[in-house]
Image (spheres, coloured by chain):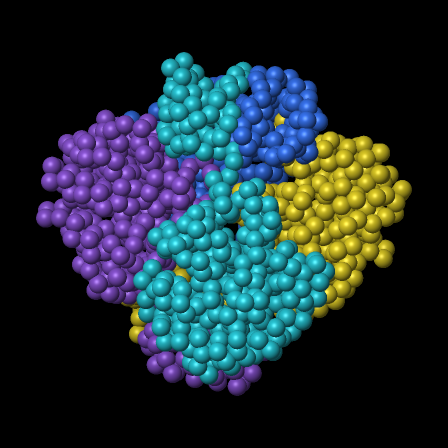
Chain colours: A purple, B cyan, C yellow, D blue
Amino acid sequence: MVVIMKPGFSQEELNSAIKEMERGGVNVMISRGSETTILGAEGNAQGIDIEKMQALPGVERVMRVSEPYKKANRKYHPDDSVVEIAPGVSVGGERLLVVAGPCSVESEEQITAVARDVKADGAQALRGGAFKPRTSPYAFQGMGYGGLDLLEKARIATGLPVVTELMSTDDIDYFVEHVDVIQIGARNMQNFDLLKRLGKTTKPILLKRGLSATIEEWLMSAEYILAGGNPNVILCERGIRTFETFTRNTLDLSAVLAVKRQSHLPVMVDPSHASGQAWMVERMSLAAIAAGADGLIIEVHNDPVHALCDGQQSITPAQFKDLMDRVGRVAECVGRTI
Amino acid sequence: MVVIMKPGFSQEELNSAIKEMERGGVNVMISRGSETTILGAEGNAQGIDIEKMQALPGVERVMRVSEPYKKANRKYHPDDSVVEIAPGVSVGGERLLVVAGPCSVESEEQITAVARDVKADGAQALRGGAFKPRTSPYAFQGMGYGGLDLLEKARIATGLPVVTELMSTDDIDYFVEHVDVIQIGARNMQNFDLLKRLGKTTKPILLKRGLSATIEEWLMSAEYILAGGNPNVILCERGIRTFETFTRNTLDLSAVLAVKRQSHLPVMVDPSHASGQAWMVERMSLAAIAAGADGLIIEVHNDPVHALCDGQQSITPAQFKDLMDRVGRVAECVGRTI
Amino acid sequence: MVVIMKPGFSQEELNSAIKEMERGGVNVMISRGSETTILGAEGNAQGIDIEKMQALPGVERVMRVSEPYKKANRKYHPDDSVVEIAPGVSVGGERLLVVAGPCSVESEEQITAVARDVKADGAQALRGGAFKPRTSPYAFQGMGYGGLDLLEKARIATGLPVVTELMSTDDIDYFVEHVDVIQIGARNMQNFDLLKRLGKTTKPILLKRGLSATIEEWLMSAEYILAGGNPNVILCERGIRTFETFTRNTLDLSAVLAVKRQSHLPVMVDPSHASGQAWMVERMSLAAIAAGADGLIIEVHNDPVHALCDGQQSITPAQFKDLMDRVGRVAECVGRTI
Amino acid sequence: MVVIMKPGFSQEELNSAIKEMERGGVNVMISRGSETTILGAEGNAQGIDIEKMQALPGVERVMRVSEPYKKANRKYHPDDSVVEIAPGVSVGGERLLVVAGPCSVESEEQITAVARDVKADGAQALRGGAFKPRTSPYAFQGMGYGGLDLLEKARIATGLPVVTELMSTDDIDYFVEHVDVIQIGARNMQNFDLLKRLGKTTKPILLKRGLSATIEEWLMSAEYILAGGNPNVILCERGIRTFETFTRNTLDLSAVLAVKRQSHLPVMVDPSHASGQAWMVERMSLAAIAAGADGLIIEVHNDPVHALCDGQQSITPAQFKDLMDRVGRVAECVGRTI
């Protein structure tokens, strides 16, 4: 930690800043510049309360030097984490994980048909929403528990593990029992109550990046789950909000690189929500894999025109097949397999 | 609703677009431009599924013309809503509502002392966090239920109604019984599960704008509560996330104007979280009132240097007193009172 | 300046970092933390090349501690700068400067009529574009030199000094001779070639903030002009670009406060471009003055419906009169006059 | 064009809106919805002045339906444009264009050595700045004309065409004579005066996207050049400004896809400025090619640690060699060559 003193600070203010740092368990080094005096922490600065430091009179600015996330930090866990989501299916290793399926579960026929199709084309897991976070209270909110049942039927029919979104702490136990990967959506990335509860489980959690979350905040949300004791966190970049409106969101592929450098956790990419347009999905998938993503989660619908949600960003099974072929070739260029 | 057809659409595509619109219950007007063909809905377009329309082949773009929020919409509720938060204390009318208090409840002494101070200076309600949403799992998370008890003691001591943040659906019943206004923080603005439950109560809800929420999304979150049957929604602008880092957030005062034009709901402003710096709070408060805000929610701490959170943005009771004097004078200029 | 070393840096890397800092003329203090080693500059760090430091192996991050702007910095110029734009008309002191006029000069009648109207209502200077920066090459680009002539006629008719935008270095000499304040638009805020040339004049420059410029970048653009020898810089906040689309831009009033704390330069606000909507102009003007702006620049047109540009954000002279009354009252609350 | 009338508009307001549209040369179709009345333009709406329409009383909103760019629009120019920058070297066809070289020209030795290295590894053109746009007036501003001379020497030594940034209209003639591709930097993307002048030349122009420019604004800036008569425009995505600060900018690869769909112009990517970090350059290059970019412009320096600018984002010739190998392999996967 580095503390910058205000110009014209008093000796008393300096002393109290030093005292507060020392109380945090560090030695303090003082650099007096011609214009600025800087205090550096010698030792482990974790014990210092940054907010208190910032509120001290005489203190201009406090700069954290080490990352606030510990368990998510690659410094203390240099090897890539590999998260197993079902026997023989994992993410974070050499083999990419491709999850595919419709935005929403709509019927047994639909979900099972899509599951069969995407499995045939190489998907290793099935996505499908039963509880849908919708901007409008008047929009289709998902089939709820009935949808979870149909996902289980699709799993039985195909063997594909199931990834689906959880919105409420009330449903955690049910999800833990019936679902393979619990997805936390962008809007709940900082629903800390939910994150804490998930930390008490051992279920794999797919944690989507919030619409305007910094990389650090995203890793801190992962830290909530990890700190609770659940090591099975998978991150998912799904586009951030910017001023550009041509695309639904702006896919931030450098975030994939950044996260993989700062953290050992696997990182997937959702090109469907990022772009919001079916015709962009294949190319953004290739770009994601080229950038180094550990997997993809893609919306596939057997009849996008009649999808109950997100039809405009869903690709067909035929398009998914082509996509998988090309993803496989790009994966090879970067030393990965599908 | 307006539908723009793709260049070179087929007659069949046009027919299916028209059919989908008619299924939604409207007549369709066709404008054929030299380059573009436009379909306009004649009648109430609410029944049309926009996402489905967008997924139709031949359709380039679908533009909604009327707002998606109904109960929050001033069109159907031209008069300002006035929300009463305690007998004789309300927001949305001529008199401004000023809520003040510490970031967190820390002890009985602290919260009662601050409550007495801010009441003496004209605050009509007390704020104070018992459950704190913190970016880090290692930061102080609030006193929890113990904090709610202390808020009640402060209410008994001063008569001030209490505003405090709810984070979990598990606590709703307790909050409804023990708290006067339930605050929903920026990070939970789209925690739809929570919003739905709050719609089943009649408790006043202070709904903060999400960090990167558009005005429309914010009003749609209000709509979740209103649609459930609870008319007592108070909006709160608290700064949005931009590229600027000098301030914690960027206070968007034109959003106050925009919301008050589009909606009948009262709008407050939180200058403390918006700026993140105590020295900015007074001036941003004056600006908020000049812009037309219906009230302010301000962090006041009797000892900011030792506050357990947000000390750097908390003002002292003495500073709050000055602020209230000046707010009163600006309020008068715009036909309001405190 | 503070330099953070990478974990596991070598002694050689440390030595070369220290050497590079010493070459810049400072003593180096070393703080060895348990995880991080920090180098602090003791003395004036201006001579150190930050980019070179950042490229050194073993260096993780370089943090500047003092602001990069010098002449614009309040630290070295504690008193507010007052810029005189015409005899007896200045900005930065107790009296607010209100500049008003149409988006574009359209005809002698129009500009003179508007000038007379706004003068009657208390404006102290006239705005009007002759060279217009337009997103589209097919849009009206302004009357050019003919427009400047008409502005001069309006000045003769009313005595109001004239503020108008310069787009090209070719026109600097002409502007210096014929115009009172040279406006540099948001899109040219980092047209460094233009800024350097303006630094060689002594003309007052109204420097608008770029659409996505940080406060620091804005002050660095002012620094270009100041460093050339021209002290007459007036800053103008005109809204920044965010994800919100209801308003044309997002007026950042906390930037006014921030700039006035960091710099001695006067800061005006343009509520017309910020909001893009005539009905918002008055309220945002009041908010700007309450926040501490030194003046306003407002689009006024005698016939907004037929304006050649920006009609939707122009107010009428009658609306301007009301606005001035209310601005006067709010100004009084914050110790200013109009 | 679609015009939405305000609720409660008068017949007179409707008539004047219709009249204004008809004056623009279109027939007007009226759709009366239960809540909204919509006017659609039948015919070519180009002649209608949108700003005037928006300022009309009774008009709530005007929505443009067709793109404002014409010459840049793929609708009127379905085939990809291929821009030749030197005999046998072009961009926009099957073969990717890779431009490489240092941020700044520093000396004859430096620029010639880098030119030789990057040529050996497959670069087809040399980049190097002689006039540098720097945020600070105190930073190295480039060698100026001397730098252009050295670029010419490097061209003679290697045969590589030269890409370098122009900042001032004063230098256009000199650049046209001595340079192969004129680069317009992000900060000058809306320096309309400069764009208009470049439209009068036939020189290839590399037009970088502004820091917060929408795709539409970027294409409108290209339109300025095209409208002047110069068809040789090459676009370059170089990252946009968002709230994320880990990377210098956020590379927006979906913009590459979007632009190539909307326009026939070639699009390159600059991964060096986008990320600001040398270790990210290779991966972001691969992602750009996978997404469909027509080429790359990469900062390569033979001694990044001593580079006069951007050392932290420059890669070495050895790293560039590896990058080219991998780019070649990914290019093959998407049907391109290098």
Q: Please name whichever residue, B82 or A131, is drawn nearer the observer in this view of the structure.
A: B82
| Residue most extreme to the top | B11
Query: Is residue A319 shown left or right of residue B230?
Result: left
Query: Is residue D291 shown left or right of residue A229?
Result: right
Numbered label tally: 0
| Residue most extreme to the front | B87
Residue B265: give x, y in percent of width and height: 54, 52
Query: Is residue B225 shown left or right of residue D141?
Result: left
Q: As displayed, is residue C327 above or below residue B327?
A: above
Q: As displayed, is residue A172 above or below residue A42?
A: above
Residue at 41%, 50% in the rendered image: B228
Res. A291 visible in picture = no
Quarter of the image for residue A191 reads: bottom left
Residue at 79%, 43% in the rendered image: C317
Residue at 44%, 68% in the rendered image: B179
The quarter of the rendered structure image containing the C terminus of chain C is bottom right
Q: As displayed, is residue C82 above or below residue B299?
A: above
Q: Please name whichever residue, A316 or A69, is drawn nearer the observer in this view of the structure.
A: A316
Q: Please name whichever residue, B193 or B306, is drawn nearer the observer in this view of the structure.
A: B193
Residue at 32%, 75% in the rendered image: A44
Residue A249: give x, y in percent of width and height: 41, 42
Residue C79: give x, y in percent of width and height: 71, 68
Residue C27: give x, y in percent of width and height: 47, 74
Res. C106 visible in picture = yes
Quarter of the image for residue A119 reads: top left
